[in-house]
Image: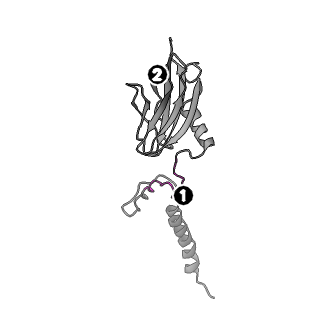
Amino acid sequence: MRSTSSARVAFPPLLVAAALVLAGCTSTGAAAPSDSSPSPAAPLPPSTPSASAPEATLPDDATELEQWAATALPENGRGGSPAVARGTGSVGPAGASVDLDPVGGSWDVVVACQSDTGAPLVVEIDGVAGTAIDVACGTPGATGAAPTTIRWDATAAAALRVDSTTDAVFAYEVHPRAGS
């Protein structure tokens, strides 16, 4: 290959010019964007939970039910007033009942619940006028509703009657009424 002196002189400036052009393309400086610059990338859509994430459900065995009840209705959660009776149960459209022994005196029956849909329970002390009350329920995986207190003068045996339009779980405690 034979080179001419003009080719030798022109070659180095071409290399320098090419290097400057390449350096300008890869610069990390804060140069103002030109009209030919691509627009910034569109933000990514928010991620959605995977379909395999387990859906929260009602407790379905005795151990899970007791764990839920310990959170929904903690023992001695009424300021140190010990419960004389405590229990848990499941209820559906057929209802449920719990026998309450006649212990004499004035008592508070405290009820907490959780239902599939958040629908309330209807709770009453069977045969005692004025004790039927809607008890607000939480839903699985969400913050639970506050427990509800029903006043009971326990002069005779009674049943705690629990009715629901959907599947639910409940916990109850019987406490001496404060000041009695």
Depicted 2 relative to depicted 97: above or below: below
Image point 48% across, 31% down: which residue? 160
Residue 131 highlighted magenta (yes or no):
no
In the rendered structure, which amino acid carries the disc numbered 1? Ser
The residue sitting at 53% across, 22% down in the picture is 102
The answer to whether 99 appears left or right of 62 in the picture is left
Q: Are marks 1 and 2 in contact (CB under 8 Å)?
A: no
The residue closer to the viewer here, 151 or 139, is 151
Magenta highlight range: 43-57
Estimate the x, y position of residue 138 in percent, counting from the top left: 46, 38
Residue highlighted by disc 2: 152
N-term-proximal mark, 1 vs 2 = 1
Front residue of 56/18: it is: 56
Mark 1 to mark 2 CA distance (whole Å): 46 Å
Dominant secondary structure of the residues highlighted in magenta in the image: loop
Query: What residue did someone put label 1 on?
Result: 52
The residue depicted at 51 percent of the width and 58 percent of the height is: 51
Q: Quadrant of residue 39?
A: bottom left
Farthest residue in the top direction?
A: 179
Q: Residues within 10 Å of mark 2 (few under 14, many from 20)?
A: many
Name the front one of labels 1 and 2: 2
Q: Residues within 10 Å of mark 1 (few under 14, many from 20)?
A: few
Q: Residue at x 53, y 66 (%)?
A: 22
